[in-house]
Amino acid sequence: TPYDYIVVGAGPGGLVTADRLSQAGKKVLLLERGGPSTGETGGRDVPPWANGTSLTRYDIPGEFQAMFGSSGPSYWFCSDINTFAGCLVGGGSSINGGLYWYPTDLDFSTDRGWPSSWSNHDQYTQALIQRLPSNDNTSPDGVRYLEEVFPVMSDILTPMGFQNITLNSNPNFKDHAFGYSAYNFQNGKRWGPVATYLQTAQPRSNFKMELYTVVTSVARNGSTITGVQTNNTAIGPNGFIPLNPNGRVILSAGSFGTPRILFQSGIGPSDMISLVQQNAEANAFLPPASDFIDLPVGFNVQDNPSINLMFTHPSINAYDNWANIWSDPVPADAAQYLKDQTGVFAMSSPRVNFWRATSGTDGITRYAQGTVRPGFDSVTTSYPYNASQVFSITTYLSTGVTSRGRVGLTSSELGAGALTNPWFTDPVDKSTIITVLEEIISAAAKVPNLTLITPDNTTTLTDYVNNYPTSSLGSNHWVGSCSIGQVVDENALVMNTTNLFVVDASIVPALMTGNPQGAIMSAAEQAVARILALPGGP
Ligand code: 6FA
Ligand code: ABL
């Protein structure tokens, strides 16, 4: 059967979009390549200690660090993208750390590459907040657990002039501000767009979601899209799903997934389309070369560079570095969570966040963000240290970062990934983050009993940053691969097409101030309102 709207991808962008389109009475099909995640979506991946419940690894915030552990094959990550991305219901929002920041005015400004008509984001951000409020005290009993890093960070930051605030109460205050980490968790569980937008869409008779369905390309007649090509022959002849007359396709397959569909549809730079042509299966679905559309898909990409500092302090409980949370958790913590979803497991690993603005040697203002958590990824140090007292400050260069890279197909096998890494292509990004790190380190040196263990005194900070492994330098916050103003217009319409739209992280033209899912969902609220208002649709 044909649809008014086919939305591709059930991540934050696609879920907001599909819910709002179906609320408006449109006949909507949401296609997702992965399977269920949380218990309410049919997921059954429950840790052994929660056997017999529907509390999956996706529901339990405290299982977050186990996403990176060795508890079995990581089927939740996309197997054909060479960086972390979630391929299941909820996309990244089902596997991420859950940090959730209301966007700032700067995030949607012309300074950040948005068309001026987008600068009034507030009504869309408010619509998002109404559906999905943030929460910085996520254990339903109101008690903060494993909070030892907070007073230590306060001792570092307060003398530097930072103010302790409720961060999402004043989103624009991001210079010398710190506070408790805010999440999109509720009732001690992962919440996000799956527990909200998807739940209102699903009961509607005009909404349908199909899982385990990979969209490979859109079919088009010149500039007009007629339907989508999938690998699922059960839902359409040869896997083809048609649009109603005047119907529209919305790609929400993420910063890597959306470009891949565009390339396979003959949209993008010629080197990418040529890789598709070299793949016999995909080549068969390309339009004639005269219909190729040359757009800078995959260029202009950003991701925050991030550097970890590791410290010890005698007050810290490193929580055994989250090592046994899947198979052998602290019995009292597991029992408490099973009883009423309170305690350590009601939260993921971060505890404190902070921001400051800083001026680079080029005069450009860049922000830096800190995320502080008990535990660490890997300590490299010549010092003896007590592993049960380690905590990490991850410092991101946030909005204002100038480096850009490129993503796309890595070969004619059509795997996706970075073609040019987006971190520190501008040396001023690197010198700026080094300045911020130096200031944190010298303030930390004044706090009694606090010891910096990584980097140690055999490494200068500059060498530490220069030799930082590329595999750890990123932050999984990819934006910009289909930037608004370059690939899509101000209504999120792919340029030179009549009915193909993109609504996901890829349209965001520059990194925002905080971890991006809040800004991405605000952008989706705005984009879908524009699409519904655009004449000529179904
Ligand atoms: N963002 C935050 O704000 N806070 C965090 O704490 C945070 N943590 C993480 C994190 O810990 C990890 C490991 C990762 C990978 C990301 C994190 N992020 C965090 C970033 C945030 O999750 C992403 O920015 C956000 O999810 C991006 O939303 P989008 O809607 O743009 O894209 P997704 O990748 O989430 O969803 C795309 C969906 O499309 C997936 O469900 C995928 O399976 C599906 N899809 C892809 N290709 C498809 C195809 N061809 N056919 C059908 N479905 C497809
Ligand atoms: C984010 O926004 C980042 O994308 C994640 O990388 C980050 O989690 C979460 N939020 C929480 O701050 C980190 C884990 O804590 C590390 O253990 C892991 O090695 C890293 O992600 C992988 O990129």
Image (tube, rainbow, N blue to C red):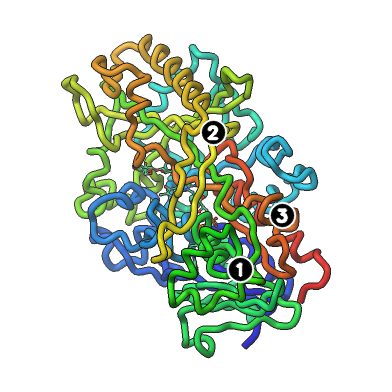
Q: Mark 1 near ligand 1 (CB under 8 Å)?
A: no
Q: Secondary structure at mark 2?
A: loop
Q: Would you place residue 212 above or below residue 378 in this image?
A: below
Residue 398, numbered circle: 2
Q: Position of residue 465 (x, y in %)?
A: 37, 26
In percent of width and height, residue 495 lies at: 71, 60
Earlier in the chain: of badge 3 and badge 1, it is: 1
Picture residue at 32% right of the left edge, 11% below the top: 448
In the rendered structure, find residue 200 and report the number of the disc placed on it.
Answer: 1
Residue lying at 65% horizontally and 56% vertically, measured from the top left:
524
Give the quadrant of the C terminus: bottom right
Where 48 sits versus 425, above or below?
below
Name the front one of labels 3 and 2: 2
Of all residues, the one furthest to the bottom in this rendering is 237
Of 69 and 271, the residue lying toward us: 271
Of the pair 337 and 250, the residue shown nearer to us: 250
Report which residue position mark 3 lands on: 526
Left or right, 50 with respect to 426, comes to left
